[in-house]
Image (spheres, rainbow, N blue to C red):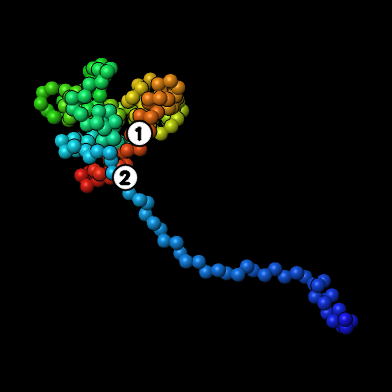
Amino acid sequence: MNPLVLQAVSDYSDGPSVELAPPIVATAAVPKVAPPPPPAPPVPVPAEFEPWIVRAGHKCEGITPGLIAAQVFSESSFTTSAVSYSNALGPGQFIPETWARWGVDADGDGSADPFSIADSVMALADFMCFNVDSVKAGITEGKISGDPVDLALAAYNAGLGAVQHAGGMPEGGDYSTQTQPYVAKIRGLEKSFDAALENRV
């Protein structure tokens, strides 16, 4: 090879390396797609329950009409005459001792009746709001951790003392096989019922 050519190659090879910027590739903007709507609830909210569920769903922060509807559905399938093996009564499935504390005469007929739609649904909301407030107080004090609404539901099912003793979501035994699935079921149905009720809120 010609010595001049060799010198030219040598000069080029020994020189400072130059990094080339990667090529700019134009990409189309990805359009934002709205998430799909929640599926329809397993059953429609009966018309006689709707006004009370909507009212109950605005009693306190964190409690929505969809949550109340999902809870009543999970408790009794909207059955006013429901009585459980443990003598829990009505749509909200209150045992007599709990009803004695939380029962209300929401429809003004002169009687606090656990089988009344109005009385049971509004008592359920009062009880849930109390649970939410109690759980939030425990969280503020550093004694409880977790989602306040989840824990309020757990307290409705297993008792506030169980949540306080566990410092959060109770677990083990019936808490794992009954309370935790109860909470998960209601939270899973909440959005579906909220969507079904949104035009009535």
Instruction: State whether residue 149 appears in this view.
Output: no
Q: Position of residue 80 (x, y in %)?
A: 18, 27
Identify the residue at horizontal 16%, vertical 27% (top origin): 116
Mark nearer the N terminus (2 vs 1)? 2
Q: Position of residue 25 (x, y in %)?
A: 55, 68
Identify the residue at horizontal 22%, vertical 27% (top origin): 91
Quadrant location of residue 175?
top left
Identify the residue at horizontal 16%, vertical 38% (top origin): 47
What is the spatial separation of the Cα atoms under label 2 and label 1, in whole angstroms? 14 Å
Give the residue type that dot 1 points to.
Answer: Lys
Instruction: State whether residue 5 appears in this view.
Output: yes
Q: Looking at the image, do the residues carrying marks 2 and 1 touch, with CB atoms under 8 Å apart?
A: no
For disc 1, the marked residue is 185
Tell how many labels: 2
On screen, 173 above or below 126?
above
Q: Say left or right for 110 vs 53.
A: left
Give the residue type that dot 2 points to.
Answer: Pro
Residue that sits furthest to the right in the current view: 3
Q: Which mark is residue 96?
A: none
Quadrant location of residue 158?
top left
Helix, strand or loop status at disc 1: helix
Q: Quadrant of the C terminus?
A: top left
- For disc 2, the neighbor class at 10 Å (few under 14, some 14 to 19, many from 20) is few
Q: Position of residue 123 (x, y in %)?
A: 23, 27
Identify the residue at horizontal 67%, vertical 70% (top origin): 20
On screen, 178 above or below 54?
above
Q: Position of residue 43 (x, y in %)?
A: 24, 38
For disc 2, the marked residue is 39
Q: Say left or right for 96 vs 20.
A: left
Of 45 and 16, nearer the camera is 45
Helix, strand or loop status at disc 2: loop
Q: Quadrant of the N terminus?
A: bottom right
